């Protein structure tokens, strides 16, 4: 039997899922994508008739938390997407095969599905030295270039692949770069987060399979439907923010009452993600709901804006860790001091002027003379020009 | 009683729009800095009541946004006035393009900042160095406005909000934009300290009424300085007329 051309639906039926499960899944994904009921019908149709998408899943510099997130998805079938809906031909973490065998499968799949498969990249690509990340004797960059050459589209899965995450944080010792920095020419979808919400991934893949185009992306390449609003604007603690009721420390009365974590450095106001809407672990909770501020893990370079528990980040590059407020206050103090010193020196240096003992309040006569001479020259030049023009016109006459 | 009668002339320097701009600008910047600090680092105010009975942080943010809109409109009016206003309000005061302005900057640094000579530099309007720092202030203001609107757009439905939101995301999102907005705020704090001090300084040593001039518009200027200014202006006008005549003659020649 040709397993490659089976649909997602066929695969599920064989695994013993009911049609009811399947329809529930389609409804869930349709709801997440914000489709109308006809859109859900389109999803059902596509999953029943279209062959699954071949997928190559590459792991570079990462911690596999993105894959872990997938395996703890809200709906059991969301996790199954990884295993059933898409035809996962190569994933060095999940596949049973290893060594030569695994590499042979990858090479074969890439050859057979050239230009048709989706490349999912988990992790960033270190450019500093091949030693930082080598798979089957080849550097991460080589592996990535090989896989990207025949891909239809690339999904940068997680913050590592989308913007480099912690290994890209200053000073970036491995010179690692996210996918969109080292590759162009094919669409790159950045599914942001550390890790991203599994349902978001399921939604993106279902969308591509159903409508055969990419979802609408924002200027950072993130799907707008999931990254269009801030955690802050969808947070259930927002009323406490507007009321100015802030948790002042993690063990105070306000924390017990569930007030806003903004003062504790919650990055919800800075972060575009749908955590407060879709939530995590079977829609149970999300960081703010469990009493800890958002750390902004779906924004690029969020590690560089440390500390996590303050809104005002440290300023780098002046030797000591200091917030801009401390530097600003110090500069203000220095300026005030400077101004005072200046006032004292003024009284000494300009005492004659202050006491009106200067005989001649000299205006800047030198400058005036220079200006006058310059104007004179200008006039002469114009006069010369005029006379020349006159001469020429006489000649022509 | 000590008194003397210097040869001074009253000069109308700051027109009404300039004065209104100055005070509106001062007021909005003060409001923006204070509310900005509260938004960036809210004070610990405890209530006995539930969130739905309070909105004070919301009001602080509203004050920041309203002040920001007034700040922007005020600045736009001033930019218009830089082309429509009198010679002391004109745009070319603020960008040092002429040799005279560049010399003026060095002269002012020598005389007023480093205090190397007891003689003062006399200018009727802004001195060249002050005017140049106002140009810097304009640039910083523009960055503050752009970054501010970029952040505001995320919670706005206005027609321009989508453009600013795209801009925000192109600039790598809230983290860097917020940081820039916060750090540049300190520029205004430093500016205010130096600016207010220098008003005291100039009024103290030059006694030309610079502090009250921003209320009434008139300054007391030494007669010689005014005469020099007027003669320069006359020269400039004459040169301008000469140029126009020359040009029209050239045109006639071409036609002939």
Image: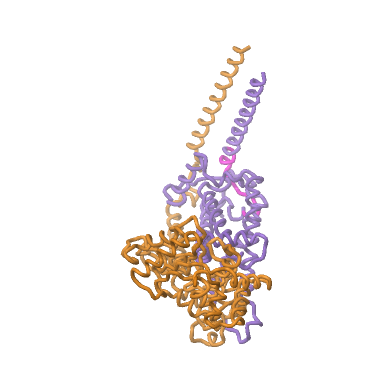
Above or below for A371 versus A155 = above
Above or below for A12 versus B246 = below
Write the residue at 65% across / 57% down: B73
**Residue A329 appearing in the image:** no
| Image location (x, y in percent) of residue A157 | 48, 68
Q: Quadrant of residue A37?
A: bottom right
Q: Nearer the viewer, residue B13 or A214?
A: A214
Q: Quadrant of residue A27?
A: bottom right
Total labels drawn: 0
What tint does the image give chain B? purple
| Image location (x, y in percent) of residue B67 | 63, 64
From the viewer's perspective, tell me whether residue B238 is left or right of residue A1.
Answer: right
Q: Quadrant of residue B55?
A: bottom right
Placement of the C terminus of chain A among the 4 image quadrants: top right
From the viewer's perspective, tell me whether residue A328 is left or right of residue B218.
Answer: left
Chain letter, colour orange in render: A
Q: Nearer the viewer, residue B141 or A297?
A: A297
Colour convention of the picture: by chain
The magenta region covers B214-227
Judge whether residue A24 is colored magenta.
Answer: no
Above or below for B7 versus A122 = above
| Image location (x, y in percent) of residue A216 | 59, 63
């Amino acid at each position: 039997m040709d397993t490659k051309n089976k649909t997602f639906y066929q695969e599920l039926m064989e695994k013993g899922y009911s049609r009811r499960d399947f329809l529930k899944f389609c409804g869930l994904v349709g709801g997440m994508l914000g489709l109308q009921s006809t859109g859900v019908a389109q999803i059902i149709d596509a999953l029943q008739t279209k062959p699954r998408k071949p997928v190559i899943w590459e792991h570079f510099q990462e911690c596999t938390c993105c894959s872990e997130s997938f395996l703890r998805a809200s709906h059991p079938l969301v996790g199954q997407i990884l295993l059933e809906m898409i035809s996962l031909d190569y994933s060095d973490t999940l596949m049973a095969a290893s060594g030569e065998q695994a590499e042979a499968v990858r090479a074969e799949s890439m050859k057979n599905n050239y230009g048709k498969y989706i490349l999912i990249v988990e992790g960033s690509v270190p450019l500093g030295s091949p030693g930082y990340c080598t798979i089957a004797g080849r550097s991460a960059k080589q592996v990535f270039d090989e896989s990207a050459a025949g891909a239809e589209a690339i999904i940068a899965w997680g913050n590592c692949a989308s913007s480099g995450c912690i290994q890209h944080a200053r000073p970036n010792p491995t010179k690692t770069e996210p996918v969109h920095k080292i590759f162009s020419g094919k669409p790159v979808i950045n599914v942001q987060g550390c890790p991203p919400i599994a349902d978001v991934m399921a939604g993106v893949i279902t969308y591509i399979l159903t409508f055969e185009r990419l979802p609408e992306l924002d200027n950072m390449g993130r799907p707008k439907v999931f990254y269009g609003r801030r955690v802050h604007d969808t947070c259930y603690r927002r009323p406490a923010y507007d009321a100015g009721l802030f948790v002042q420390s993690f063990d105070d009365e306000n924390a017990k009452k569930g007030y806003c974590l903004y003062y504790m450095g919650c990055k919800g106001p800075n972060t575009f993600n749908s955590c407060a809407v879709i939530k995590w672990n079977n829609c149970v909770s999300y960081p703010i709901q469990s009493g800890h501020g958002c750390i902004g893990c779906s924004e690029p370079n969020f590690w560089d804006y440390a500390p996590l528990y303050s809104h005002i980040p440290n300023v780098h590059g002046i030797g000591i860790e200091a917030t801009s407020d401390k530097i600003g206050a110090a500069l203000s103090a220095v300026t005030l001091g400077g101004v005072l010193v200046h006032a004292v020196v003024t009284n000494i240096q300009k005492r004659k002027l202050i006491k009106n003992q200067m005989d001649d309040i000299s205006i800047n006569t030198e400058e005036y003379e220079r200006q006058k001479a310059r104007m004179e020259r200008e006039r002469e030049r114009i006069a010369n020009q005029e006379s020349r023009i006159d001469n020429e016109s006489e000649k022509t006459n | 009683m000590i008194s003397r009668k210097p040869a001074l002339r009253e000069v109308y320097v700051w027109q009404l729009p300039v004065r209104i701009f100055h005070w509106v600008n001062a007021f909005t910047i003060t409001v923006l800095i204070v509310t900005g600090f509260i938004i960036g680092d809210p004070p610990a105010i405890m209530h006995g009541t539930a969130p739905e009975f309070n909105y004070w942080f919301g009001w602080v943010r509203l004050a920041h946004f309203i002040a920001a809109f007034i700040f922007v409109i005020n600045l736009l009016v001033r930019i218009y006035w830089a082309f429509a206003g009198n010679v002391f309000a004109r745009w070319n005061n603020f960008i040092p393009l002429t040799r005279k302005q560049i010399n003026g900057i060095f002269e002012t640094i020598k005389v007023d900042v480093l205090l190397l000579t007891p003689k003062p530099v006399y200018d009727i309007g802004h001195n060249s160095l002050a005017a140049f720092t106002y140009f810097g202030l304009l640039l910083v203001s523009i960055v503050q406005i752009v970054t501010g609107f970029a952040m505001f757009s995320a919670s706005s439905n206005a027609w321009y909000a989508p453009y600013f939101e795209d801009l925000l995301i192109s600039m790598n999102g809230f983290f860097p934009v917020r940081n820039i907005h916060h750090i540049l705020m300190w520029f205004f704090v430093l500016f205010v300290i130096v600016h207010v001090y220098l008003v005291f300084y100039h009024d103290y040593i030059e006694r030309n009424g610079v502090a009250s001039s921003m209320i009434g518009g008139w300054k007391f200027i030494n007669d010689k300085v005014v005469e020099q200014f007027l003669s320069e202006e006359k020269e400039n006008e004459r040169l301008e007329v000469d140029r126009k005549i020359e040009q029209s003659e050239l045109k006639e020649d071409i036609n002939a």
